[in-house]
Amino acid sequence: MSSKVSPNAATSLVAAGTYLSGDLSFCKELVIAGTVNGSVTGAEDGTSTVKILENGAFSGEVSAPRVEIFGEVDANVTGTNSVVIGPKAQVSGVIRFHQLAVSPGAVITGELVTMDVSSKREPGNDRKEVKESA
């Protein structure tokens, strides 16, 4: 029996009602509609994306070129290219990013840290304490 899945199809899904605990690495796209507790790492080729959907929940550490948050996150988040926070997102923890987009209605509690490799900043000078509702 041959598989009809394209070798280019690289979306991984943690479906609603699924609980995953542990470390996970992925290549292209990881969509979290269930609950994940652990460490998630995307390929650093600049194309991988983690999406935490509205009913999804994540706690732990996440690092990927692009991170999109629409659900609940209690984690250290690193978006080496960008982080997008949706209107119903509830985020707590340290968020590191090059580009950040926050929708009105999002709730962020924690630190926002701009990653800027072109300037020589002392650690801690680029941190902003945040506790507000957008």
Image (tube, helix red, strand yellow):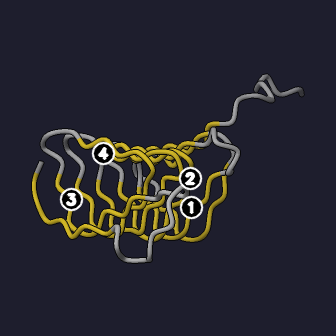
Compared with 99, 123 (above or below) is below
Position of residue 69 in the picture relative to residue 40 (left or right): left
Position in image of residue 127 (x %, y %):
31, 69
Q: How many marks are shown on the rendered structure?
A: 4
Q: CA distance from mark 4 to mark 1?
A: 18 Å
Q: Earlier in the sequence, mark 2 or mark 4?
A: 2
Mark 2 Cα shell of 10 Å, populated few (<14), some (14-19), many (≥20): many
Mark 4 Cα shell of 10 Å, populated few (<14), some (14-19), many (≥20): many
Which element type, helix, strand or loop, lies under badge 3?
strand
Q: Earlier in the sequence, mark 4 or mark 1?
A: 1
For the residues bearing labels 2 and 1, Cβ distance under 8 angstroms: yes
Residue at mark 3? 108
Q: CA distance from mark 3 to mark 4?
A: 9 Å
Compared with 48, 95 (above or below) is below
Amino acid residing under circle 1: Val
Position in image of residue 113 (x %, y %):
36, 64
Q: CA distance from mark 2 to mark 1?
A: 8 Å
Please state, as top left, top right, bottom left or bottom right, where the N terminus lies in the image: top right
In the rendered structure, find residue 85 and report the number of the disc placed on it: 4
Q: Earlier in the sequence, mark 3 or mark 1?
A: 1
Residue at mark 2? 64
Q: Earlier in the sequence, mark 2 or mark 1?
A: 1
Position in image of residue 62 (x %, y %):
50, 62
Residue at mark 1? 40
For the residues bearing labels 3 and 4, Cβ distance under 8 angstroms: yes
Q: Who's the residue at 50% across and 43% down the image?
A: 31
Which element type, helix, strand or loop, lies under badge 2?
strand
Q: Earlier in the sequence, mark 2 or mark 3?
A: 2
Q: CA distance from mark 2 to mark 4?
A: 15 Å
Amino acid residing under circle 3: Ile
